[in-house]
Image (tube, rainbow, N blue to C red):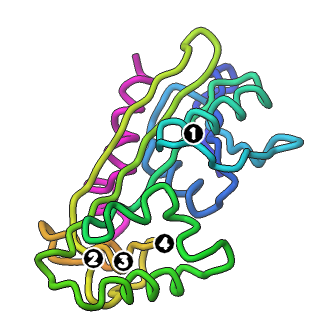
Amino acid sequence: MPSAPSSSSPVLVLATLNPHKGRELLALLGAVPFQIKLLSEFPGARLPDETGQTYAENALVKARTAFSLTAALALGDDSGLEVDALGGAPGLHTARFGGPALSDRERWDLLLERLRDVPPARRTARFRCVIALAGPARGEQVVEGVVEGLIAEAPRGSGGFGYDPVFFYPPLGRTFGEISDEEKRRVSHRGKALDAARRLLSE
């Protein structure tokens, strides 16, 4: 459940309807001087389609939408996997890579198939996350986090979600699907972006 430091603390709304992402955002954000709520707790909760041309545009649209629905400070995020051998794809279309009906595993399979003849040294990739804040008095602020890695030749591990089992992180010698939640919090793109957001929220 979202945490509440005090009933008199201001509210921070996390602008996501994705339960996996909501749990990760809560864990990564840590201690901030706000009551943290999920957008899904509010009547009429909705988010627009991601039609922006950048991660920042998509994150800002989510934050603005949540702010307009709740009148509270809102945090929106957008993230993607950028594979160099695919010209930066799937990028902004990471969550819909291959079509909206595909499962995570089907997306891994498609990605690995596209990279089937690409040697390990050329399988460089990165996860990028942009966090946007929108709300009263604060206005709008944007921060970013990036983590570099490689696309594994086969999925490894059952942890995390999304593309984690095929994203190999060289400093730890494992995929994001194999590392612990605590390790992922320290090194992930979303962890880095939320560290920056937490500093803004604590000012």
Q: Secondary structure at mark 1?
A: strand
In-front residue for pair 127/25: 127
Residue 193: where, in percent of width, then height?
37, 41
Question: Does 156 appear above or below 4?
Answer: below
Q: CA distance from mark 2 to mark 4?
A: 15 Å
Q: Residue furthest right?
A: 43
Name the residue that disc number 2 marks: 151
Residue 82: where, in percent of width, then height?
34, 61
Of pointers 4 and 1, the one earlier in the residue sequence: 1
Q: Is residue 68 left or right of residue 199?
A: right
Q: CA distance from mark 1 to mark 3?
A: 24 Å
Question: Does 81 appear above or below 65?
Answer: below
Type of amino acid under label 3: Gly
Residue at point 15% right, 76% down? 173
Of pointers 1 and 3, the one earlier in the residue sequence: 1
Which numbered dot is residue 161?
A: 4
Query: For the magenta stretch, what is the residue range?
Result: 179-203
Name the residue that disc number 3 marks: 177
